[in-house]
Every structure is written in C-alpha cells, then in structure tokens.
Image: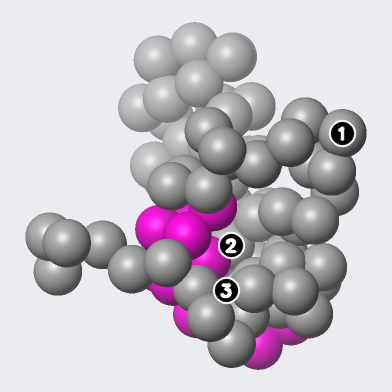
C-alpha cells in the first residue's frame, strides 16, 4: 500500500482533476493486483490485448480476481518485451 504515499507529491502534476481521478483508478487497479498476488505487468498486457475481443457482457471476467481464476495460468504476452 506504499504506492499512495509515494505519489503524493506527484499528484501536484496531474494537470487536471480528471487526470488525478484517472491516476487514482490506475493505482487502485495496481494495488488490487498486488493483493490478489497477480503480476500487474502481466495483467495489464493481457487485459489491454483481450479487451477488444472479449464480449462486453462478460466484462467482469477482466477484473483482477476473476481474471486470475480464468486467465491467470494462460495469459497473453507482448511481442515487445
């Protein structure tokens, strides 16, 4: 949970209230991944690739907890890294 105190000074440079809100959402997602013992990098790479082909009616499967159960063992990887 050290992510939030480390970012306090950085929040001054979000440029807008919307930017600060988006940063909060991203940090919450990363902390949730850590609490579920998921590598945040693997999760984000997989979800960002999968979101365009995944049915909208099953979007809850892309939340960290359900993602770990369904895709955690066979996640998509990036060609770049």
Query: Which residue is found at the position 74% from the left and 36% from the top?
Result: 55
What residue occupies the far left of the structure in this picture? 80
- Left or right: residue 38 compared with residue 10: right
Position of the N terminus by quadrant? bottom right
Q: Position of residue 62 (x, y in %)?
A: 72, 54
Residue under label 3, please give it. Answer: 2
Q: CA distance from mark 3 to mark 2?
A: 12 Å
Asked if the residues shown at circle 3 and circle 1 are in contact, with their CB atoms under 8 angstroms apart, the answer is no
Position of the C terminus by quadrant? bottom left
- The residue lying toward the viewer, choosing from 1 and 74, is 74
Q: Is residue 59 part of the magenta span, yes or no? A: no
Q: CA distance from mark 3 to mark 1?
A: 34 Å
In this picture, is 54 found above or below 79? above
Query: Which residue is found at the position 50% from the left and 21% from the top?
Result: 19
- Foreground mark, 2 or 1? 1
Task: Residue 72: name its quadrant.
Answer: bottom right
Secondary structure mostly seen in magenta is helix
- The residue lying toward the viewer, choosing from 42 and 56, is 56
- Left or right: residue 75 compared with residue 30: left
Task: Residue 32: name its quadrant.
Answer: bottom right
Q: CA distance from mark 2 to mark 1?
A: 24 Å
Mark on residue 57? 1
């Amino acid at each position: 949970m050290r992510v939030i105190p480390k970012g306090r000074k950085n929040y001054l440079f979000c440029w807008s209230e919307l930017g600060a809100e988006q940063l909060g959402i991203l940090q919450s997602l990363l902390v949730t991944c850590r609490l579920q013992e998921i590598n945040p990098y693997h999760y984000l790479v997989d979800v960002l690739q999968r979101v365009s082909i995944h049915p909208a009616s099953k979007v809850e499967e892309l939340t960290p907890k359900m993602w770990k159960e369904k895709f955690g063992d066979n996640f998509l990887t990036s060609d770049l890294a």
